[in-house]
Image (spheres, rainbow, N blue to C red):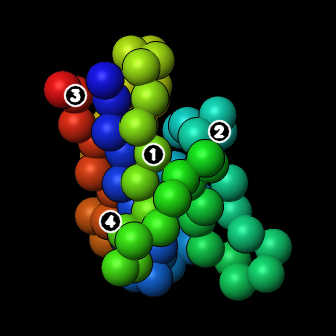
Amino acid sequence: MVIVTLQRNKCIGCNYCVEIAPAHFRMSKKDGKSVLLGSSEKKGFHTVKTNDDSAFEECYQAQKACPVKIISTKKK
């Protein structure tokens, strides 16, 4: 299982995550911040859990590229 978490309120809208992992991230037209597709929000953390192991590599690359370090990618 792959678990991806985004602290959306700290997003600066750089768009790196969307460029690297477009299947998992989009930029909001309302506020210009990143949206983790299919996620649920709890206390400012947007999380998605998937059994698709291919999601790990893309999301991990987005995590490494994020200048404010608000993306977390884990494999369980």
Q: Residue at x 81, y 73 (%)?
A: 29
Cα separation between marks 1 and 2: 15 Å
- Residue lying at the far right of the rendered structure: 29
Viewer-nearest residue: 53 or 60: 53
In the rendered structure, which disc, 3 or 4, sits on the residue that comes first in sequence? 4
- Would you name the residue on which mark 4 appears? 70
Residue at image position (45%, 82%) is 9
Image location of residue 59, percent across then percent down: 41, 37
| CB under 8 Å between discs 4 and 1 | no
Tell me which residue sits at (61%, 74%) in the image.
33
Nearer the observer, disc 3 or disc 2? 3
The x and y percentages for residue 55 are: 45, 25
Instruction: Report the amino acid beneath label 4.
Output: Ile
* Residue 73 image position (x, y, % from top left): 28, 41
Residue type at mark 2?
A: Pro
Label 4 SS: loop
**Side of 48 relative to 23 (left or right):** left
Instruction: Give the amino acid type for the residue marked by disc 3 in the picture.
Output: Lys
Q: Which residue position is annotated with label 2? A: 22
Q: Is residue 63 visible?
A: no
Image quadrant containing the N terminus? top left
Q: Which residue sits at x=45%, y=45%?
A: 48
Instruction: Give coordinates of residue 19: x percent, y percent.
Output: 61, 44
Dividing the picture into quadrants, the one containing residue 57 is: top left
- Indicate left or right for 49 with 40 as reference: left
Badge 2 crowding class, 10 Å Cα cut-off, few under 14, some 14 to 19, many 20 or more, is some
Nearest to viewer (mark 3 / mark 4): 3
Marks 3/4 in contact by CB < 8 Å: the verdict is no
- Residue placed under numbered mark 3 in the picture: 75
**Mark nearer the N terminus (4 vs 1):** 1
Instruction: Find the distance from the CA under tag 3 to the CA under tag 2.
Output: 20 Å
Q: Which mark is residue 48?
A: 1
